Structures are given as structure tokens and as C-alpha cells.
Image (tube, rainbow, N blue to C red):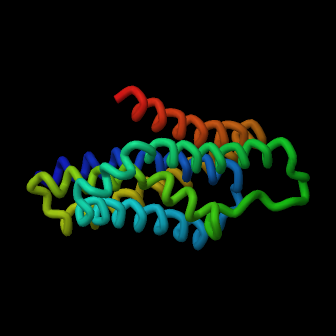
């Protein structure tokens, strides 16, 4: 597989990370650069490691999880998105918005946005793709795309306030529904 194809795959895999970063920064506009880097780096690492796991495991693991991976992604994104919606309507003004840069939120979001990358690893295993070239391209692309999502979300959140928080939660739930529908229609 040529480099351009790997870059396009990396952009496709990064789309969910972009949307999550966008919605997370809409909800929590006070994220520091360090927190943004931590989330973008976590997304990038998960996006880069999952294809390697898929590539190493080959068809066996993909067959085992392909029947329910879409449900896992949907569940994780719906859980986090639902919590964001609940926070938008129930948190008091003096409370800090949720911190997506650490703990279970960071892990859930990183896993949920990288499950499709596992299947891409299988494609790489059966193709002529150099996995050791693809992995850094995917990781770096995801880091950059996630960082852009944070920058745009921060500005949108400043302009729109609480309605933007609601949109952020709905975006996550929408991504989960999209993943679920795509896999159920196959």
C-alpha cells in the first residue's frame, strides 16, 4: 500500500478523534495545553497501537470481536456523551467541567475512537502494507487532527456556551450511533 493510501486511512481513523476532541473542548474550555497534549497523545497512541494488535493477531481476534466491536464503541461513546449531556444540564456554575484528560474518561474515549483501527490492522496484515511505516503515520496524523479539533472546539465553546456543551455530547452519541449503524448494515 502506498504512502498516500496510508495517509488517507490515517485521516479516516482520526475523524472520530477530531469529533471527540471538538466536543470535549466545547464542554471544557479551560483545558490546558498539557491536558490537550495528553489527550491527543493518548488518542494517537491508541490509534497507532490498535493496527499493530490487529496485524499481529490476524484473522483470529478480528473474527472474535467483529461481531460486537461496534456495540463496544457505541456503548463507550454513548456513555461518555450521555454523561456530557447530563453535566450540561445538571452541573452548577461553580463546578469544574469534566476533565477528559485523565482517568476512565481518557481511557474510554481512547479505546472507543480506536476500535476501527484494529480492523485496519487486519487489512494491513493481508496486504502489502509496511506496518512499521503505517503506525507512525497514523499516530502523527491522529495527534495533529485531534489537536486541531481541540483548537476549533475551544473557540466554538467560547462563542456558543451551554448549547455547545449539549452539541458536544450529542456529537459523541452520534458517532456511536454511526458506528453501530455502519456495522449493523453490513
In the rendered image, residue 51, in percent from the top left (x then y), is placed at 30, 60
Q: Is residue 60 above or below residue 164?
A: below
Q: Does residue 140 appear in this view? A: no
The residue furthest bottom is: 34
In the rendered image, residue 36, in percent from the top left (x then y), is placed at 57, 65
Q: What residue is at 31 percent from the left and 64 percent from the top?
A: 53
> Is residue 28 found left or right of 17 in the rendered image?
right
| Residue closer to the observer: 149 or 50 | 50
> Is residue 6 found left or right of 35 in the rendered image?
left
Q: Is residue 159 above or below residue 138?
A: above
Based on the displayed image, in which of its 4 quarters is residue 162 positioned? Answer: top right
Q: Does residue 48 appear in this view? A: yes
Q: Is residue 36 above or below residue 109?
A: below
Q: What residue is at 54 percent from the left and 70 percent from the top?
A: 38
Number of marks in the image?
Answer: 0
In the rendered image, residue 167, in percent from the top left (x then y), is placed at 66, 37
The residue furthest left is: 128
Q: Is residue 177 above or below residue 53?
A: above
In the rendered image, residue 100, in percent from the top left (x then y), is placed at 64, 61
The residue furthest top is: 185
Amino acid at each position: 500500500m502506498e504512502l498516500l493510501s496510508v495517509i488517507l486511512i490515517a485521516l479516516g481513523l482520526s475523524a472520530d478523534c477530531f469529533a471527540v476532541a471538538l466536543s470535549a473542548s466545547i464542554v471544557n474550555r479551560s483545558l490546558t495545553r498539557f491536558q490537550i497534549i495528553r489527550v491527543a497523545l493518548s488518542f494517537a497512541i491508541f490509534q497507532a497501537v490498535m493496527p499493530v494488535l490487529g496485524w499481529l493477531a490476524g484473522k483470529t481476534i478480528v473474527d472474535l470481536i467483529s461481531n460486537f466491536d461496534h456495540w463496544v464503541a457505541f456503548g463507550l461513546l454513548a456513555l461518555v456523551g450521555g454523561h456530557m449531556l447530563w453535566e450540561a444540564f445538571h452541573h452548577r456554575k461553580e463546578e469544574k467541567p469534566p476533565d477528559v484528560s485523565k482517568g476512565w474518561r481518557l481511557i474510554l474515549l481512547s479505546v472507543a475512537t480506536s476500535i476501527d483501527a484494529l480492523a485496519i490492522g487486519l487489512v494491513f496484515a493481508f496486504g502489502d502494507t509496511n506496518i512499521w511505516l503505517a503506525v507512525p503515520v497514523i499516530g502523527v496524523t491522529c495527534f495533529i487532527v485531534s489537536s486541531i479539533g481541540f483548537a476549533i472546539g475551544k473557540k466554538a465553546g467560547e462563542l456558543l456556551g451551554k448549547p455547545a456543551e449539549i452539541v458536544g455530547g450529542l456529537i459523541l452519541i452520534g458517532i456511536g450511533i454511526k458506528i453501530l449503524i455502519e456495522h449493523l448494515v453490513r
